[in-house]
Image (cartoon, grey):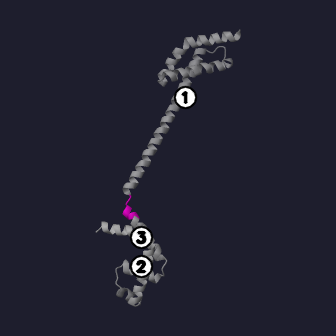
């Protein structure tokens, strides 16, 4: 018999307060279905925990407090979700701006020339110092064979040999770049 009277009490609470509690919840969550779900969950929470409540508790006040907390939890989760979404949007925008700035600053010709220069430097580093210095004098300092021969105390034939040997190695090292170098030279003609 006690179970029947408990159910009657619950049904009476439901009939008397459900609509008021739903209106209250809806003013915060702006969604009728969600507000109704929150109220029903709150009523069920009360029902499941009614044995631990004091006799003097105002039951409608207690249920309204549960509704309030459930609305707060929902709004806090919503705010956190929006904060995370805003953070992700800002991060995506920042990454996109970085990519755009990087592409705008990218100079393919310079990258290409830097790579070629790096291969030249590495190849020259494999030669003995004298051969390397003879080539540098010829190509970077624009000295002719006679001037280089006098500087190093060698014959012009020796100078030609060192330069030819170096050029052959460079051609081999840069063989993959020749088609691009030829196109680049034509573009600047």
Picture coordinates of residue 153 (x, y %)? Answer: 41, 90
Please state the horizontal and vertical placement of residue 189, each as a whole percent of the image.
28, 69
Say which element carries label 2.
helix
Residue at mark 2 to residue at mark 3: CA–CA distance: 14 Å
Which marked residue is nearer to the observer: mark 1 or mark 3?
3
What type of secondary structure mainly makes up the magenta span? helix
Q: Nearer the viewer, residue 119 or 55?
A: 119
Q: Earlier in the sequence, mark 1 or mark 3?
A: 1
Using a 10 Å C-alpha cutoff, classify the residue at mark 3 as few (fewer than 14 neighbours), some (14 to 19) or many (20 or more). few
Q: Is residue 17 magenta?
A: no
Which label lies toward us, 1 or 2?
A: 2
Left or right: residue 70 versus residue 173 is: right
Name the residue located 34 percent from the left edge and 67 percent from the top edge: 183
- Residue 117 circle label: 3
Mark 3 element type: helix
Position in image of residue 124 (x %, y %) = 45, 76
Please name whichever residue, 36 or 50, is drawn nearer the observer in this view of the structure.
Answer: 36
Task: Name the residue: 53% across, 17% down.
Answer: 21
Give the residue at mark 2.
167
> Is 110 covered by the magenta stretch?
yes
Q: Which residues are magenta?
A: 106-111
Q: What is the number of the mark on residue 73?
A: 1
């Amino acid at each position: 018999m006690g179970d029947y009277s408990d159910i009657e009490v619950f049904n009476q609470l439901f009939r008397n307060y459900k609509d008021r509690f739903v209106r209250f919840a809806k003013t915060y969550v702006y969604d009728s279905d969600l507000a109704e779900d929150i109220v029903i969950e709150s009523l069920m929470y009360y029902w499941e925990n009614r044995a631990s409540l004091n006799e003097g508790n105002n039951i409608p006040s207690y249920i309204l407090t549960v509704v309030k907390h459930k609305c707060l939890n929902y709004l806090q989760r919503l705010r956190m979700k929006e904060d995370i979404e805003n953070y992700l949007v800002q991060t995506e925008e920042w990454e996109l701006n970085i990519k755009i700035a990087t592409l705008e600053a990218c100079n393919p010709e310079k990258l290409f020339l830097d790579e070629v220069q790096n291969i030249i430097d590495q190849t020259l580093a494999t030669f003995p110092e004298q051969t390397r210095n003879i080539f540098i004098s010829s190509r970077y300092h624009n000295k002719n064979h006679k001037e280089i021969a006098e500087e190093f105390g060698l014959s012009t034939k020796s100078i030609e040999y060192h330069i030819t040997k170096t050029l052959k190695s460079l051609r081999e090292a840069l063989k993959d770049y020749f088609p691009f170098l030829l196109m680049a030279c034509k573009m600047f003609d």
